[in-house]
Image (tube, rainbow, N blue to C red):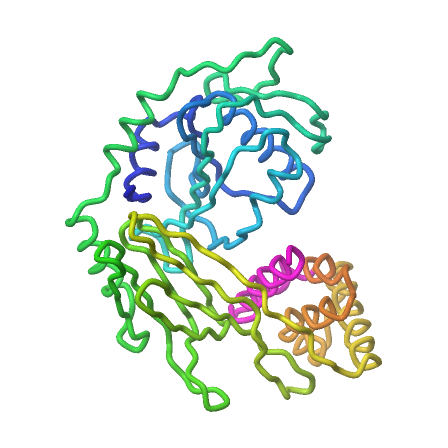
Amino acid sequence: MINKRLLIKNLLSHNDENSFYDKKMKLSLTSKEGKGKFLKHICALSNSNPTNNSYIIIGIEDEENKIVGVDFFDDSKIQNLVNAYLKNPPKITYENVPFPSLPRHKVVGLVTIHCNGTITSLLKNAWKYRKDTIFYRRGSNSMPAFKNFELRDTNKHTVDAIEKNANNNIKLTLDGVFDFFNNHKPEYNPQYKVFNEQFVLCWAGEKKLLEGKEFYTRVDIELINEQVRLFFSSLDEVQISYNKNSFIITEYISLGLDKEEKYYPLEKTIINFKENGKHDIVTEFLFKSPSFDEMLIQHIYHNNNVITSKIEAGIPLSVLEHEDVLRLPKNYLLCFLYGYSDSVQQLKKAKEYIKCIEDKTTYIKYKEALRVFRKVKYS
C-alpha cells in the first residue's frame, strides 16, 4: 500500500518536472483553456509511460518547489472528462493528500495516470488542440508527436523505485493516526476504526442533532494507510455509519425560503474495504428537488442578478443588498436546481466581493455551493 504523502515527497525530490510527472499550482477545469491543457498533459504522460504510472501534483509553487496546497476537490467524475475527450483514455484517479504544514482546509492534489499500453490521442477538439493529435513528454514539456509515433518504455525502473520507497509501514500509519488526533480539537470527536485488519480510517466532525437525527458538520475523513483525505466539508451536514467492511457517508444540503430550511439527502458515498488489500469507493446521487413557489424562485433569481450586476459594474450596494449577498450562494443554488442554468456563472461574478467580506462564512458557502453545482451537473 503506497503512502501518497511520501510518494509526493519522493516525486518532488526530482525537483524538475520530467517525462513521468508534472506539477501545477492549481487545476482549472471550468475554462476551455484549463480543460484543454489538462487533457494535453494526461495524453502526453500516458503516451510517455506505457508500462508504469505517471503523476500530476497540484498545489506546488513551481519555481521554489514549495507546497502551497489547494482546496479539497471531490469531483469523482473527472474520469468522464478524460473518456469524453481522449481516444484510448487511461484510467486516472484524483486524490486529496493532507500535509501537516498546510491549513486544515488545504491539501495537495495527486492525479495518477495508470498505464494502458496503447497510444492515446484527442478524440475531439479541446481548446486550440485539434482532434487526433497525439502528445508525448519531452523533458518537462508536453509536445505534439509525429504520425509515426511509437510507445517506448523509458521510465518503468525509475518509477517502480519511487513507488517502492513510498510503501506504507507501521510507523507511518501510527504517525498518521497521531497527527490526525492532534490536528482535531476534542469537540470534533476524532475517532478511528480498523477494517479487515489492514485499513485504518480516521474521521472527525462536530456532532449535532437535527430533526431528531444525529449529524456531523466540519467533517474530515482520512484513509491513514495511504494518507489520503476521502471527504472534507466545512458546512454541510453529514450522517456517518459503518459495518464490518464498509464506511458510509450520507451528505445533506439545507434548502428553503424565508429562513425556513429543511435538510435533503444529496449523495451517499460507500467505501468498501476488501480482503485482498484493496478498496473501492461507490457514490450514489440521492437528491430530489423539493417543490417551492415558482414565482418566488423567479423573484429571487431576478434579485440575485440585480446584485451581481451592480457588483460587476462597481456600483455600491445598499445595506439590504449587502445582507442579500450573504444568502447569494444558497439562493443561486436554489435557482440552479429550478432550471436557471446560468446561476453558476452569475454567482461567480460576485466571487471577489464575497471573498473580501471580513466574515469568511459566506465565502465558504460560496465554495460549498460550487461543489454542489458540480455534483448535480454530473449526476
For residue 142: magenta?
no
Q: In x, y percent, where is residue 295?
A: 84, 80
* 270 or 75: nearer the viewer: 270
Q: In x, y percent, where is residue 35?
A: 63, 39
* 328 or 148: nearer the viewer: 148
Q: Main secondary structure of the magenta part?
A: helix
Of the 4 image quadrants, the one containing the N terminus is top left
Q: In x, y percent, where is residue 107?
A: 40, 51
Magenta segment boundaries in residue numbering: 350-379
Q: Is residue 173 left or right of residue 358?
A: left
User: What residue is at 27 percent from the left and 55 percent from the top?
Assistant: 199
User: What residue is at 15 percent from the left and 49 percent from the top?
Assistant: 171
Residue farthest to the left, as pictured: 171
Q: Is residue 138 left or right of residue 10?
A: right
Examine the rendered structure and indicate whether residue 265 appears above or below residue 98.
below
Q: In x, y percent, where is residue 356?
A: 57, 63
User: What residue is at 33 percent from the left and 62 percent from the top?
Assistant: 245
Examine the rendered structure and indicate whether residue 99 appears above or below residue 113.
below
* 179 or 113: nearer the viewer: 113
Residue farthest to the bottom, as pictured: 212
